[in-house]
Amino acid sequence: MEGGAGGYNPRTPEQVFGDFRGRRAGIVKALTTDVEKFYQQCDPEKENLCLYGLPNETWEVNLPAEEVPPELPEPALGINFARDGMDERDWLSLVAVHSDAWLLAVAFYFGARFGFDKESRKRLFNMINGLPTIYEVVTGAARKQPKEKAHSSNGKSNKSGSKVVWIDCLPSRSSESHAKTSKMPPPKEEESEGEDEDEEENGNTLCGACGDNYGNDEFWICCDICEKWFHGKCVKITPARAEHIKQYKCPACSTKRSRV
């Protein structure tokens, strides 16, 4: 299958990881920002369907490859049959788990095919393991991993009496309440004795769309319904547009009512 093959064969651990990351990003989009489109394409009345992630960060729902054996390992077959028989979140989580297994199968298929030695396989696994699984992104488990806490930072911030409040793992300064601030990106932490710890936890904060880590130099926006954080670019929201949004709903929350 052309979509499953992706059109090229990576031959180094770094190239295989690039292929893995592109396919993973496509599947994450299908199960988060494009969930309505994905849901509609998984019609239980159709034949056995598979969810493919493509190296160019896109996805497709399609029939499995006809050739035996296929060029690459195939994803879970017939994901559409369970769609209407399960709670939607449980169904998406199930698809996510099978997608994680498929991505690993494809990556290490390349590793075996091109004769990766022990060190190359270890390097590939370590790069893969540095990313949260699709299941963790879809269920929100990745966002819950950093320890939630509220504490006063040391040094300069104490002089002004400001408080660092951790909300959904993203820090926002507030001297009176724990409410989320505006739709602007989470402010950068001031230098303090706990800077290393804060940076480590910030690094584990993930975008609900692409699953990538929090970055101080990027614009983020929080959904007022599911309270997940997103890169502005992933949900096509600019800082200027965010200033005029009273209540932001992410793509997944915006389309839920249409399926009720």
Image (tube, rainbow, N blue to C red):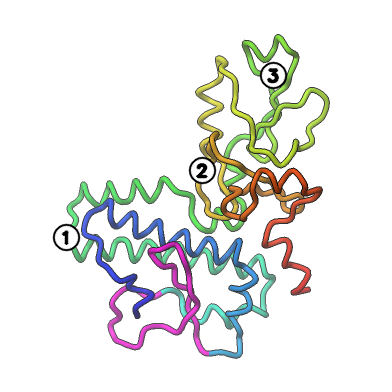
The residue that mark 3 highlights is: 152
Q: Determine the CA span between mark 3 and mark 1.
A: 52 Å
- Between disc 1 and disc 2, the foreground one is 2
Percent coordinates x, y for residue 178 in the rendering = 78, 32
Percent coordinates x, y for residue 28 in the rendering = 52, 60
Q: Amino acid at mark 1?
A: Gly
Q: Amino acid at mark 3?
A: Ser
Instruction: Tell me the residue at 45%/84% (across/down).
Output: 63
Q: Determine the CA span between mark 1 and mark 2.
A: 31 Å
Instruction: Tell me the residue at 54%/69% (across/down).
Output: 95
- Between disc 2 and disc 3, the foreground one is 2
Percent coordinates x, y for residue 117 in the rendering = 17, 53
Percent coordinates x, y for residue 67 in the rendering = 30, 87
Mark 3 residue crowding within 10 angstroms, few (<14) / some (14–19) / many (20+): few
Q: Quadrant of the C terminus?
A: bottom right
Asked whether residue 57 is drawn in magenta, I would say yes
The residue that mark 1 highlights is: 115
